[in-house]
Amino acid sequence: PQWDHFGSQTLFLKVLFANYEEGYAIIELMGEWNDLLYNDIMFLKREFADELMQEGINKFIFIGENVLNFHCSDDCYYEEWFEDISDEDGWIAFLNFRDHVLEDFSRAYIDQYLLVGGNLQEIRWRTMHPNQLYESVKAMVMKRIG
């Protein structure tokens, strides 16, 4: 399948699976995440996440092994997204992002709105059924926020 364009010039995504009954989506990202020049988070939030949230998705699993780098701007859209889903027991989990990208998220304090690092970096998602992946991530998330 082709990578989907959602408005960003340098970042693309692919929805691997969405379960509207359970309220989660598994999304793979590829490219350069650049909030500084292109405001990628605005496009990701407005053109993609908001659409899924209207359909009942409030748990997002992003796979980022193909995100090459991250350039931050501010955290307004991250904060807004976090507030939109946290009222409904939602969350945003990042799996398998490169270490330097996670460090950039941390330096920009973006990681306060996302679940990143730790065991989420070790998930071998390619061999898992989507429901199995969701349950594994959900268990890790509940340990962290519970």
Image (tube, grey):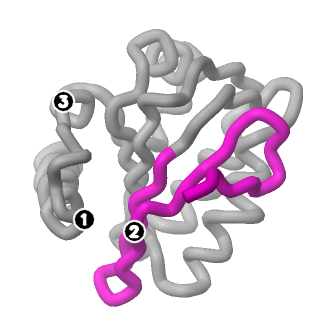
Image side of residue 76 versus residue 137, left or right: right
User: Which residue matches tag 2?
Assistant: 17
- Vertical comparison of 138 with 89: above or below: above
Q: Amino acid at mark 2?
A: Phe
Instruction: Say if mark 2 contacts mark 1, CB within 8 Å.
Output: yes
Residue 130 disc label: 1
Residue 27 seen by the camera: yes
Q: Which residue is mark 3?
A: 122
Farthest residue to the right: give it.
Answer: 37
Residue at coordinates 42% horizontally, 29% vertically from top-left?
A: 65
Indicate the position of residue 145 as horizontal and vertical percent values.
22, 50
Task: State the separation of the CA atoms marked 3 and 1.
Answer: 16 Å
Residue 146 in sight here:
no
Q: Which residues are magenta?
A: 1-28
Residue type at mark 3 is Glu
Q: Is residue 4 magenta?
A: yes
Corner quadrant of residue 112 = top left
Closer to the observer: label 3 or label 1? 1
